[in-house]
Image (cartoon, grey):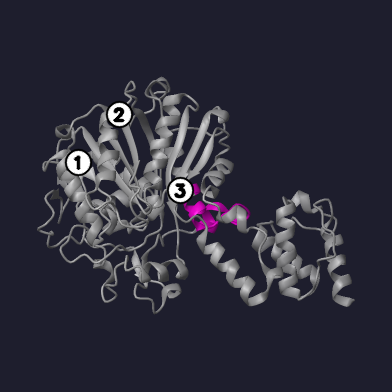
């Protein structure tokens, strides 16, 4: 029995992106729709000698210059990226933090690992130099909600705010949660998405032990190759992607351009395994069907999917089978992770923003590094170059460790 | 570096205090140092000067000069 509610489509009025593909929404979108080889992936000293010693980094970024020493010192890097993306999104939406009703502005930001790098550094300080050399900032900088609270402080947002932690679906769940907050009327403006930055030797060493990440060390730029027959795992990336969302009538009242709409949200839990998705993709199917029912759309309406597409053998196969089953074989599917890396808890925020841009531009980005499509994958994945198409409805899917699935339905404004 | 130089450098480089903003009589709170910042500053000074400031009570009402004097007391002690 599915409880049906009156459909609610939140207006997206602003976007902010910081990714390895570019700093800023324009730079990121330009790279994703023009470049065939990712420029943001590089070897990292921190990861030296690990089976995976490379990562996607947003290198074109001077956080001290942008934030100032006094503000920056209270954030680990994932929060810094969130604040920079939030400033862009709010500016893009034409909102003025000096004059908005600050008690009605919500901030919802997903992250899988929060300030893990700072945690690592402080653990190293304690083991090497003793407890008296540990920073007093461990808790405030490392908690998952630190990105949300940092954005609140930076913009003076005083409505309900929270961090969302559902591993690699965190960003998508954050946008879905913001959709529900707006629908429930508990805020008028929501800043939502994800942020992640985990250049952490400990975490990547463990991911290598799990055999989850690519070990294509001879050519890191081609390591992440979603839906390709030779894919061998994901490549971690850092980044932040945030949306400004409002009720459509509020956006219209202040004459703000509506870039696209978040029309439906669904989430589910596999209740199956710590890491592996349900082998038939039943959990992500349930999330997607819930989101489509919420938006009142059918499979035939969906023209584009920004897939989770991590470049692991299992994810891409399970997800593709599910997409074909639920939507058919007509939607133009892409994974933008070959350009951004897998940004874990930020992925859903970044990729939802890219889905908004795809709807706006009527352009589906190509899946970089997809040279030989896996013949077991029964969907149309755009490759080699972006594809122009006419579509009014798109889908974003995300799966997280622990079996946390989420899907959004987006519509053209 | 003496204690005053270490404190001034840390305030500028780690807490974003503008050079010239600091005089001996400046209260730490007017440099936007709250209780968390003071505890962070304590760790940084201990590390750089190899002193133990555990017994020094620090509040944001204290001035930069009082902080420097407290460190000097520990260094010479």
Q: Do the dots labelled 1 and 2 sit on one chain?
A: yes
* Image vertical order of residue A51 relative to residue A117, above or below: below
Real-space Cα separation, disc 1 to disc 2, in angstroms: 18 Å
- Viewer-nearest of discs 1 and 2: 2
Which of the marked residues, 1 or 2, is nearer the chain's N terminus?
Answer: 2
Tell me the subunit letter for badge 3: A
The disc at residue A294 is 2
* 1 and 2 marks in contact (CB < 8 Å): no
Q: Position of residue A312 (x, y in %)?
A: 26, 61
Tell me the subunit letter for badge 2: A
Point 31% across, 47% down: residue: A398
The residue that disc 1 covers is A304
Q: Position of residue A411 (x, y in %)?
A: 26, 32
Which of the marked residues, 3 or 1, is nearer the chain's N terminus?
Answer: 3
Q: Pointer 1: residues within 10 angstroms few (<14), some, or many (20+)? A: many
**Quadrant into which the C terminus of chain A falls:** top left
Using the rendered image of the protein, determine whether residue A74 is visible from the camera's viewpoint. no
Using the rendered image of the protein, determine whether residue A23 is visible from the camera's viewpoint. yes
Q: Bounds of the magenta span?
A: A63-83
Real-space Cα separation, disc 2 to disc 3, in angstroms: 23 Å
């Amino acid at each position: 029995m599915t409880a049906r509610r009156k459909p609610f489509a939140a207006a997206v009025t602003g976007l902010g992106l910081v990714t390895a593909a570019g700093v800023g929404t324009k730079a990121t979108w330009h790279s994703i729709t023009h470049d065939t080889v990712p420029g943001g992936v590089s070897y990292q000293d921190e990861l030296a000698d690990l089976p995976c010693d490379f990562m996607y980094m947003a290198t074109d970024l001077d956080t001290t210059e942008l934030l100032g020493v006094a503000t920056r010192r209270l954030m680990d890097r994932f929060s810094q990226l969130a604040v920079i993306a939030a400033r862009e999104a709010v500016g893009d939406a034409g909102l003025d933090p000096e004059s908005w009703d600050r008690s009605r502005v919500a901030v919802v930001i997903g992250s899988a690992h929060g300030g893990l790098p700072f945690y690592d550094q402080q653990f190293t300080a304690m083991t090497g130099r003793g407890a008296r050399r540990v920073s007093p900032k461990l808790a405030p900088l490392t908690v998952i909600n630190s990105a949300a609270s940092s954005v609140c402080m930076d913009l003076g947002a005083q409505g309900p705010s929270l961090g969302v932690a559902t591993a690699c679906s965190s960003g998508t769940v954050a946008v879905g949660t913001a959709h529900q907050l707006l629908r429930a009327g508990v805020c008028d403006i929501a800043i939502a998405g994800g942020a992640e930055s985990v250049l952490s030797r400990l975490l990547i060493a463990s991911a290598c032990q799990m055999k989850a990440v690519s070990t294509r060390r001879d050519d890191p730029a081609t390591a992440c190759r979603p839906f390709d027959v030779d894919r061998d795992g994901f490549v971690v990336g850092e980044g932040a992607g945030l949306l400004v969302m409002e009720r459509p009538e509020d956006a219209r009242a202040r004459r703000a351009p509506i870039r696209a709409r978040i029309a439906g949200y669904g989430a589910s839990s596999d209740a199956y395994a710590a890491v592996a998705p349900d082998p038939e993709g039943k959990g992500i199917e349930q999330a997607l069907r819930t989101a489509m029912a919420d938006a009142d759309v059918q499979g035939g309406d969906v023209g584009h999917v920004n897939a989770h597409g991590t470049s692991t053998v299992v994810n891409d196969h399970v997800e593709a089978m599910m997409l074909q089953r639920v939507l058919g074989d007509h939607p133009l599917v892409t994974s933008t992770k070959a350009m951004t890396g897998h940004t874990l808890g930020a992925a859903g925020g970044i990729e939802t923003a890219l889905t908004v841009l795809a709807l706006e531009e009527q352009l589906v980005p190509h899946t970089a590094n997809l040279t030989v499509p896996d013949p077991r994958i029964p969907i149309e994945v755009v490759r080699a170059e972006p594809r122009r198409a006419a579509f009014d409805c798109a889908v974003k899917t995300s799966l997280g460790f622990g079996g946390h699935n989420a899907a959004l339905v987006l519509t053209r404004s | 570096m003496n204690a005053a130089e270490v404190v001034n450098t840390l305030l500028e480089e780690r807490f974003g205090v503008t050079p010239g903003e600091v005089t001996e009589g400046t209260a730490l709170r007017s440099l936007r140092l709250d209780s968390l910042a003071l505890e962070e500053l304590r760790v940084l000074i201990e590390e750089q000067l190899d002193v133990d400031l555990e017994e020094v009570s620090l509040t944001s009402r204290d001035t930069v000069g009082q902080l420097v004097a407290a460190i000097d007391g520990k260094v010479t002690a």
